[in-house]
Image (cartoon, rainbow, N blue to C red):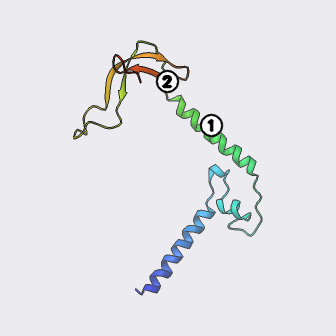
Amino acid sequence: MKEEDFHRIADQALAAAQLATRCASHSSLNHASPGSLAFGRDMILNIPFHADLIVLQQHRQQLIDKRLLRANAKRLRHEYKVDDLVSRLDTLPPAGDKLGPTAKGPFKITRVHHNGAVTIALDRLVRE
């Protein structure tokens, strides 16, 4: 195969992939295609396409809120109290020990803040 033939085939494949991407409808775009939104024309038929961008933004926000509610429904609610014992996660495992413990503790909670964050006593004089 000649080098020109390879370049021609690659160009055709890239053009087909680009057209497919522009013509594909997306549920986040209220089943419109990115090309029709960008160019104001339907990507298959030669007709004008008018999009209401406010409705699209509201639709996407509804999808985001729905996914957020579903994710938050799986979380367990826990209220920390002073004198509870907790563990602190280490960001890095001990050197040379990939399977070693990643948490240290238990540490006593000394204060619970209004936003749910806690202050723990790492040592007699050290608070985090």
Name the residue type under label 1.
Asp
Name the residue type under label 2.
Ala
Q: Position of residue 6 (x, y in %)?
A: 45, 81
| Disc ID at residue 65 | 1
Above/below status of 64 relative to 42: above
Q: Position of residue 29 (x, y in %)?
A: 66, 52
Q: Nearer the viewer, residue 102 or 10?
A: 102
Q: Quadrant of residue 19?
A: bottom right
Which residue is at a point 51% across and 73% down the rendered structure image? Answer: 13
Marks 2 and 1: which is nearer the front? 2
For marks 2 and 1, give the CA distance: 24 Å
SS class, disc 1: helix
Q: What residue occupies the far left of the structure in this picture?
A: 96
Which residue is at a point 26% across and 36% down the rendered structure image? Answer: 94
Above/below status of 38 relative to 110: below
* Mark 2: few/some/many CA within 10 Å (<14, 14-19, 20+): few
- Name the residue tied to disc 2: 117
* Mark 1: few/some/many CA within 10 Å (<14, 14-19, 20+): few
